[in-house]
């Protein structure tokens, strides 16, 4: 996340708070994040140095015609400063600030396959023991964890993945093997000393 994106997001949320439109602007920003994340063409369009800032602003104003005035002002500001490439990052940061403002934390849950209702219930149970805030669950699918889940809320992490358990087992096996070898060598030295 660039510092510029954070500064823009903070400025927009302050204006939205002053105008009482934070929820509506947050919906605008969610739409922008979804559009930017789902379209490689849009990302390329926004970051292209060949396309003029005015063309970018006009296109965004057309695509996002029903946005709040604060969001339209952001488009104008990005046009003036020629910074459209950070629009997605600004929108993402705004969403985080909005959640923070409303006491909502994001729980990132990494699973090997998409979450089932049963797993979501287990995760929510664990979340209740970690955080007393409202929590929004975001599921990240990563087959490398093999099974189970990894829960991250803010700077706290709970790793109940099969990959983690296998790694712990491997480490314990190595440690115990080293201890056994060390004991065997001591025993061997004692036998040599007795002769």
Image (cartoon, helix red, strand yellow):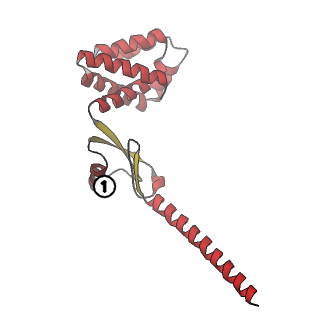
Q: Quadrant of the C terminus?
A: bottom right
From this viewpoint, is residue 67 visible? Answer: no
Residue shown at the point (43%, 20%) measured from the top left: 7
Residue shown at the point (31%, 23%) measured from the top left: 28
From this viewpoint, is residue 175 visible? Answer: yes
Query: From the viewer's perspective, is residue 164 above or below residue 66?
Result: below
Residue 180 spot, x, y in % from top left: 61, 76
**Identity of the residue furthest to the bottom in this view:** 195
Query: From the viewer's perspective, is residue 32 above or below residue 169?
Result: above
Query: From the viewer's perspective, is residue 179 above or below residue 114?
Result: below
Label 1 neighbourhood size at 10 Å, few (<14), some (14-19), many (20+)?
some
Q: Is residue 92 left or right of residue 82?
A: left
Location of residue 70 by image quarter: top left
Disc 1 marks which residue? 119
Question: Of helix, strand and loop, which one carries label 1?
Answer: helix
Residue 156 spot, x, y in % from top left: 39, 46
Residue 166 spot, x, y in % from top left: 49, 63
Residue shown at the point (70%, 83%) measured from the top left: 188
Residue 125 spot, x, y in % from top left: 27, 53
């Amino acid at each position: 996340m660039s510092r510029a994106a954070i500064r823009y997001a903070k400025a927009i949320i302050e204006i939205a708070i002053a105008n009482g439109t934070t929820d509506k602007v947050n919906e605008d920003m969610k739409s922008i994040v979804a559009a930017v994340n789902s379209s490689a063409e849009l990302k390329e369009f926004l970051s292209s140095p060949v396309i003029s800032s005015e063309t970018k602003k006009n296109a965004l104003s057309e695509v996002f015609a029903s946005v709040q005035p604060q969001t339209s002002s952001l488009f104008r500001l990005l046009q003036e400063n020629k910074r459209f490439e950070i629009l997605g990052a600004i929108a993402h940061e705004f969403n985080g600030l909005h959640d923070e403002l409303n006491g909502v934390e994001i729980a990132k849950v990494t699973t090997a396959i998409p979450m089932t209702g049963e797993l979501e219930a287990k995760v929510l149970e664990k979340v209740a023991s970690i955080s007393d805030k409202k929590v929004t669950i975001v599921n990240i699918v990563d087959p490398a964890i093999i099974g189970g889940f990894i829960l991250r809320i803010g700077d706290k992490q709970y790793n109940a993945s099969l990959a983690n358990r296998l790694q712990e087992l491997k480490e314990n096996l190595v440690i115990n093997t080293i201890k056994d070898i060390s004991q065997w060598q001591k025993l061997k030295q004692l036998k040599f000393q007795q002769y």
